[in-house]
Every structure is written in C-alpha cells, then in structure tokens.
Amino acid sequence: MTTLLSKRFAIHRLSSKVQKFLQECLLCKHIKGGHLVQRPWGPTFKVERHNEGVHWDYLTLGASFGQSAYVLVIKDALTHYYELFPSASPSAWNAADGMVSWYMRSGKPEVLVSDQGPHFQNEMVKMLCSELKVEHAFTPVYSPWVNGTIERGNKDILQVLRALLIEYKLDAREWPYLLPIVQANIKHTLVESLGNLSPIELFLDYQLHRRWTQWRARLTIRPAILSGKVGDDAAMYLDNLRAALRGMHKDVIDRKERKRLQAVARLKGSPCNCGLGDYVLWSRVDKRISPNKLIARWAGPFKLVELRLNSFLIKNLLTGMEYKVHGSRLKLYSDSSFNVTEEIAELISNQGMLLGVEKFKSHRYNAALRRWELLVSWVGLTDSEDPWEPVIEMLKDVQAKVSSYVNDVQEKDLREAIQEATGTS
C-alpha cells in the first residue's frame, strides 16, 4: 500500500499514516491475530485450609464390562485429596450423590468450583448447594486452564490407569476394578509441590496418627490402662492435631505462592485494555460450526457489561445473550463511544454465529433442490430476516424442536422424509 501511494501522491510521513490506518481498521481485527491473547498472570482461587475449595469434574473413560463409562472426580484444592465415583452417565443426580458422599466422609466444602457443563449448572446441584450452604463458582467456558488443578488430576488418573492395565494385562473395559487402587495410589503418593507430603497426610493427618502409634508401641509392649473420663485429654490432642495441620498447610501455601511468583516473573503477557462499556471481539469456540478455515475466528463486536475477577461478561448486540469469557479470548474492538449502526448489526449476523431457534413457522418442499425446508424464526432477528433452512441441518442442531413441530403439523410426507433421513420408523 505504501509503495502504491508514494508513486501517485506526495504524502508527509506516509508510512506512519498507513500503519495507523491498518491498526484502526475494524475489519482487520476480525481476521488477524491468533486464537488467544496471552494475558499477565492474575489472581486465582486461593485457599488456606482443607475443604475451603473443592473442584469437581467428570472424566470420560469409555465403556466398561459394567454400566460405568465416566468417573466423577472430586479434589480438594489445597491438599490434592481425591475421591473417585464411577457412574454410567455425567448426570446431575450422580454429581449430587458423589458430593453428598464427600460431605459424609470429609466434611462440608465451603466453595465448589466446576465448569459450566449441564451436569453442574442445573436446578438439582443448585438445590444441593442451597441445602448444604455451599457456594458454587463456575469457570469461564472454553478456558480449562482456570480450573487447571482438576484437569491436571484427570491427567494423573489416566496415566495411572493406563499403566495398571498394561501391568496386569487387563482389558481396557475392566478399568472400574482398578479405581480403588488408583485412588489409594494418588492419596498416599508423596508430592513435591506439597512439601514431599501425601494428600491424605495433609487432609486427614493419617501419617501423624501412624507415627504416634509406632512411637507408642516402642514405649510399652502391654496395652495401656486408661483411667478417668474418656474426654479428659481430648481437647489437648485435638489442639495439637489442628496445630500440626495448620503448620503443614502453611508450608504448602508458601510453596504454591513461590511457584506462582516465579511463573509471573517468567511469563509476561499483554494486559487486557478493555473497560466497562467497551466493544470487544471474542475468539469463539463452537463445536456446532464446521471447521471452515474461511470463517473469521474473532466474532463480534460484543459489549462488555461486567468486569469479574478472572473473566468478563459480554453481551451479544443482536440477541442480548450474555457470555462469561476469559480475558485471553477477548481483544478490544472500539471504546464505549462506538456507534452501532445497521451495517454493524448486519456484519454481526453474517459471521457464522449460531443463534437460537425461537420457533418454526412453516414448511415447504423445495422441488428445485429436492429437499424439505423449514421457515425458521431466529432469536434476536426480525420476521423479515426469517430464512428457509434445510430440515436435515435443523435436525443436527435442534432435533427436539423439529420433532415437536412435525408432531404438531401432522404432515405425512414431511414425517416420512425425516424418518428416512434419520433411519427411524
């Protein structure tokens, strides 16, 4: 561009003007840059005692000889203490049942941290947290590193399971029989980041009780004869136990903070320069969109409506839907003075963003294309923008709504076409 302009015009400081023009080009922001923007290390979820924060997630392990195909992994944030619960499906019922089992054995957690999967973000889990007086915190979508402690634990579980299956020459579908061994292995393994202590030692002080038993055995070979009331010295022993746990927990917290500060000094990132009310682009991840290389990765603009600790809340300008997004998936589009025109609205609607289906208004058979089509009312769009979409494509995204519409209209030919396409009767 600079060469072409210099041949035709005499412009003072042409290079800097061209550079400024390219930097301010709104269209270029949609297509340039990677999928993520490296941000500086920020504050994470900090805990200072066991059960203050508990992470949970589902790990897919595949089919087994029984009904189990998933494992509910529950992990204490400070001590890395695990419990594993095999389940047939990643359902809210199994998640609630596993958390109640944790509550019975290990006490009540103060905060639960999970992703925004439907098995965690639903009325059953919400009711459970309300009854137990537990706060439930969700991590931003498509940002697994925010909940990295449970993701790292899932990796360890997979590695140990693979090793045991090879060692004992077992079929991969026999993994449920190995879960107790895996759980015991992880609980009792000394961890460098925990000060060369095991999770069970930090969580339950198991090793301290064992050392006390060994020391007591060396003192006498005869059973001790207790005198007085049972609870005479209980308070003293409990105080000593709590003091020992606090000391070990403090050492673990100090180690983690040193590692965090070292990582902050080693990895530099660009700060997120977006303010409240600004317009931003979102590096979207939507599995429903085919991996087309021609679709722009940075979609938007969206309006930034709320600043949070580790994330931002952005709003779609067409539908009004709000999304919780990590800062690494956002970049500034324009400040709050930006004027959203009809042209910008049209640009937003033409970026491959999948809108929600409000309802189906009508249907027809397209003889030219030899296919059935539905008149779709999209959420956030006007009636004049309602398009005719192929029934086959709608079945992939909203099969339940298509089936409901077909049952309502009682169109025999349409029903037969859908049955033929899906292979059902």
Image: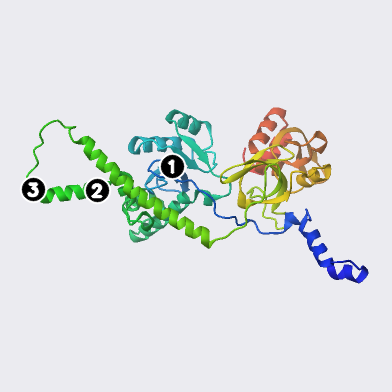
Residue at 80% from the left image edge and 45% from the top image edge: 344
Which picture quadrant has residue 387? top right
Packing grade of label 2 (10 A; few <14, some 14-19, many >=20) is some
Residue type, label 1: Gly
Q: Mark 3 points at which residue?
A: 220
* Residue 221 in view in this figure: yes
Is label 3 in a helix, a strand or a loop? loop
Q: Please state which of residues 346 and 64 is positioned toward the viewer in this rendering.
A: 346
Residue type, label 3: Thr
Give the mark nearer the N terminus: 3 vs 2. Answer: 2
Q: Name the residue under label 2.
A: 208
Q: Please state which of residues 279 and 81 is positioned toward the viewer in this rendering.
A: 279
Q: In this view, does 72 lie to the left or right of 327?
A: left
Q: Is residue 200 left or right of residue 340?
A: left
Q: Mark 1 points at which residue?
A: 53
Residue at 45% from the left image edge and 43% from the top image edge: 56
169 is higher (above) or lower (below) than 380? below
Q: Please state which of residues 18 and 295 is positioned toward the viewer in this rendering.
A: 18
Can you give x and y, in whole percent of width and height, for residue 256 in the image?
42, 54
